[in-house]
Image: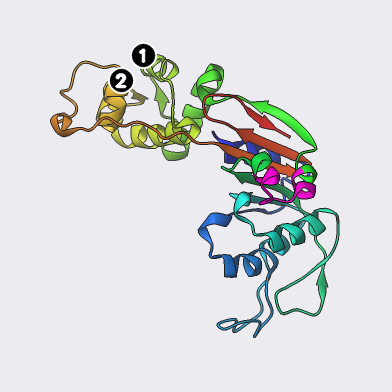
């Protein structure tokens, strides 16, 4: 749903934009290492800790820390996170000296945290601490005016000066974008590779993706040599929440997102 794009925009336009941006996917880290990644550890704190290491909270001091998939945090880390959000200092793993930080925290999850609270899997006090302010962020298909600015932004990251032709832009605006901003970014990257001239033409969109070729409704399969063996792709539904203190962004499949 472009939640990281929203989170980065919050950082970019905030007073701490000149400071650090740090992000991590909590689901990608083993549970036994997550605490040391977030809060750091001292030398000898556990097997393999050959030197002291600051955590992500310390690295993001005066800046923004983005935690993706925060619904994966266990009960003990939820309590520690709540204390940090309330302004309390914390210990590194194996440490004896408290550490204080000033961090803008933005967190995300694909879980239904309200249901998790009711089921006792997520702390109610932490949930409410993360849900103080809410904004609405609709899916990309409902934000037609955002499609081309984002598309040109992703294109410029790969080949500055390259633009989409008017015909190609019309095709992009008319597409449903089930993969949201991530799918649009991939199209921009592929188009930058296949474009032969100063503009991305419709033919370049066809060459860049056989799947995009069919889902955009083109009938000419000449740009897709392997189209006979192509299996049609259907995106999976996804629910994602971004929450920050005091800001939350959430997204649900088929409906608008919210920022709080």
In the picture, measured across the screen, residue 208 lies left or right of residue 95, that is: left
Q: Position of residue 7 (x, y in %)?
A: 64, 40
**Residue 196 visible in the snapshot:** no
Q: Are marks 2 and 1 in contact (CB under 8 Å)?
A: yes
**Picture quadrant where residue 193 is located:** top left
* Residue at screen point 15% across, 34% down: 229
* Residue at screen point 49% across, 32% down: 181
* Residue at screen point 80% across, 53% down: 85
In the picture, measured across the screen, residue 49 lies left or right of residue 173, that is: right
**Picture quadrant where residue 46 is located:** bottom right
Task: Please name the colour scheme applied to the rendered image.
Answer: rainbow
In front here: 144 or 157? 144
Q: Secondary structure at mark 2?
A: helix
Disc 1 marks which residue?
Answer: 167
Q: Earlier in the sequence, mark 2 or mark 1?
A: 1
Q: Position of residue 136 (x, y in %)?
A: 67, 26
Using the image, tell me which numbered label, if any, was put on residue 17: none
Is residue 72 shown above or below 247?
Answer: below
Indicate whether residue 55 is drawn in magenta: no
In front here: 48 or 116? 116
Disc 2 marks which residue?
Answer: 202
Q: CA distance from mark 2 to mark 1?
A: 6 Å
In the picture, measured across the screen, residue 7 lies left or right of residue 165, that is: right
Q: Which residues are magenta?
A: 116-127
* Residue at screen point 69% across, 42% down: 243
Q: Position of residue 16 (x, y in %)?
A: 76, 47
Is residue 198 shown above or below 127?
Answer: above
Q: Position of residue 190 (x, y in %)?
A: 34, 36
In front here: 42 or 122? 122
């Amino acid at each position: 749903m472009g939640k990281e794009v929203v989170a980065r925009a919050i950082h970019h336009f905030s007073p701490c934009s000149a400071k650090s941006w740090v992000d991590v996917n909590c689901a990608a880290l083993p549970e036994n290492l997550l605490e040391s990644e977030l809060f750091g550890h001292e030398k000898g704190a556990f097997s393999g800790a050959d030197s002291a290491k600051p955590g992500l909270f310390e690295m993001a001091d005066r800046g923004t820390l983005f935690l993706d998939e925060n619904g994966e945090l266990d009960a003990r880390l939820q309590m520690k996170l709540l204390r940090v959000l309330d302004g309390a200092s914390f210990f590194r793993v194996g440490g004896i000296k408290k550490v204080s930080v000033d961090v803008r925290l933005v967190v995300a999850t694909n879980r239904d945290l309200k249901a998790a609270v009711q089921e006792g899997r997520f702390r109610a006090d932490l949930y409410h601490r993360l849900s103080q302010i809410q904004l609405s962020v609709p899916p990309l298909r409902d934000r037609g005016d955002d499609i081309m600015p984002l598309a040109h932004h992703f294109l410029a990251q790969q080949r500055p000066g390259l633009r989409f032709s008017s015909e190609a832009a019309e095709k992009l605006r008319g597409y449903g974008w089930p993969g949201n901003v991530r799918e649009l970014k991939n199209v921009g990257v592929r188009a930058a590779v296949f474009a032969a001239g100063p503009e991305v033409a419709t033919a370049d969109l066809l060459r860049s993706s056989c799947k995009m070729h069919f889902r955009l409704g083109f009938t000419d399969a000449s740009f897709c040599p392997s189209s006979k063996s192509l299996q049609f792709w259907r995106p999976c539904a996804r629910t994602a929440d971004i929450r920050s203190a005091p800001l939350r962004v959430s997204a649900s499949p088929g409906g608008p997102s919210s920022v709080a």
